[in-house]
Image (cartoon, rainbow, N blue to C red):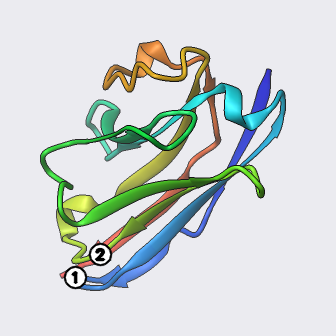
Amino acid sequence: QVQLVESGGGLVQAGDSLRLSCAASGRPFSAYGMAWFRQAPGKEREFVAAISRLSDSTRYADSVKGRFTISRDSTKNTVLLQMSSLKPEDTAVYYCAADQQPYRLRPQPGEYEYWGQGTQVTVSS
């Protein structure tokens, strides 16, 4: 299995940028498809972005397309989420997730076997 630890969250103003990082340990990182999800208070967990094991495929939620970029560095066993032009509606706890099927890029949380503990992102207006 794999262990995931997110970092990089914080309080920013609308229009700012922020980069989240997810460090993976355990089973070889390259075996997994990786994704970011987020969950705002009182709402269901929602898909943000996903990337395949060799970074040759990505998928984004419409709400973040053009503003967020997902990437992975297999030499450092990390997956990144670069967020720009942040909006108050981006406020949520952001979670990193790993899928044992490395090319599915599914948007459903139930398709991912491993999760981090989350990092809070708050965007003020």
Percent of width and height locating residue 68: 30, 62
Percent of width and height locating residue 120: 49, 60
If you read the primary sequence from the N terminus, does the residue marked by circle 1 or circle 2 appear first?
Answer: 1
Looking at this view, name the residue that lies furthest to the right. Answer: 26
Q: Residues within 10 Å of mark 2 (few under 14, many from 20)?
A: some
Residue 97 picture quarter: top right
Secondary element under disc 1, as helix, strand or loop, is loop
Residue 17 picture quarter: bottom left
Asked if the residue under mark 2 is in contact with the one under mark 1, i.e. CB atoms within 8 Å, the reply is no
Q: How many marks?
A: 2
Task: Reply above or below: 89 against 2.
Answer: below
**Amino acid type of the residue that numbered disc 1 sits on in the rendered structure:** Ala
Task: Reply above or below: 42 against 1.
Answer: below
Residue at x 74%, y 50% (from the top left corner): 77
**Amino acid type of the residue that numbered disc 2 sits on in the rendered structure:** Ser
Percent of width and height locating residue 71: 49, 55
Give the side of residue 103 with respect to residue 3, left or right. Answer: left
- Which of the labelled discs sits on residue 14, or is there none? 1
Q: Nearer the viewer, residue 50 or 93?
A: 50
Q: Residues within 10 Å of mark 1 (few under 14, many from 20)?
A: some
- Which of the labelled discs sits on residue 103, or is there none? none
Residue 80 picture quarter: bottom right
Quadrant (top left, top right, bottom left, bottom right) of the N terminus: top right
Task: Reply above or below: 67 against 6.
Answer: below
Q: Nearer the viewer, residue 42 or 95?
A: 95
Q: What's the distance in space between the residues labelled 1 and 2, CA to CA? A: 9 Å
Residue at x 45%, y 14% (from the top left corner): 111
Residue at x 44%, y 51% (from the top left corner): 93
Q: To which residue does mark 2 refer? A: 84
Q: Nearer the viewer, residue 123 or 21?
A: 21
Quadrant (top left, top right, bottom left, bottom right) of the C terminus: bottom left
